[in-house]
Amino acid sequence: MRHGEYNFKSNGQTIKFKGFMAVYVEGKEEEEEQIPELEVGEILKKYKIEPKQSFTEPPPRYTEASLVKALEEKGIGRPSTYSPTITTILERRYIEKEQKQLMPTELGKLVNNLLIHNFTDIVNVDFTAEIEKNFDSIAEGKEEWKKTIREFYKPFEKELKKAQEEIDKIEIKEEVSEVACDKCGRMMVIKYGRFGKFLACPRIS
């Protein structure tokens, strides 16, 4: 036996190298399938080939139901606020519904990035859940609402002023369609109105 090799018995057969079994053996059924000792030059018969190609897929998008469930699990909001929250982000065009899935719009992604960048202490799950607890304490008379608001607003006011200076410099680009304007020939841009999307001439937009 060469240096570093070792043999041990398994189900009446000699196994030359344990491999993963050095740290993990589940039971006798698995032992019966272990590879027996092999000889140099020995021809092995093919048992089965299963070609399979896998792709990494992103997590599924939220639906209204799964979003409400996530909010409940993280302690964000209350049953009375779930529906108005979803309605608001739909009306402000931060998300769109596509086959029941809630998809972020370009505007929604932009607003989200701005909030995360400028209000890191506020735009996070822990803060939202904690403030809900504070509201409960105020309702129960355990906390003074003025004190809670004061502790929140002083640092928030500084962050808000800083963010306003940066946000004023950001230009939101219009989404260009593939439809040409019959008046000027330029590609029309996508606008949003009271009843949803519509096309507009870029010269008068």
Image (tube, rainbow, N blue to C red):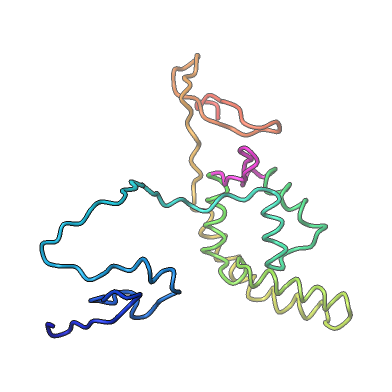
Identify the image quadrant of the N terminus: bottom left
Residue sitting nearer the eye, 28 or 124? 28
Residue 165 image position (x, y, % from top left):
53, 60
As drawn, the residue found furthest toward the bottom would be: 3
50 and 155: which is toward the camera: 50
Q: In the image, what residue occupies the spot 73% across and 53% down?
A: 85
* Magenta stretch contains residue 104: yes
Q: How many marks?
A: 0
Q: Is 88 inside the magenta-drawn segment?
A: no
Q: Residue at x 58, y 69 (%)?
A: 159
Q: Is residue 16 left or right of residue 2?
A: right
Instruction: Indicate the position of residue 199 as horizontal and vertical percent values.
Output: 57, 25
Outermost top residue: 182
Which residue is at 63% across, 75% downward? 155
Residue drawn 23% across and 53% down? 45
- The image shows residue 124, relative to residue 81, as above or below, that is below
Image coordinates of residue 102 in percent, x first then y, are 62, 45
Q: Residue furthest front?
A: 12
What span is in magenta?
92-105
Q: Name which quarter of the figure residue 145 lies in.
A: bottom right
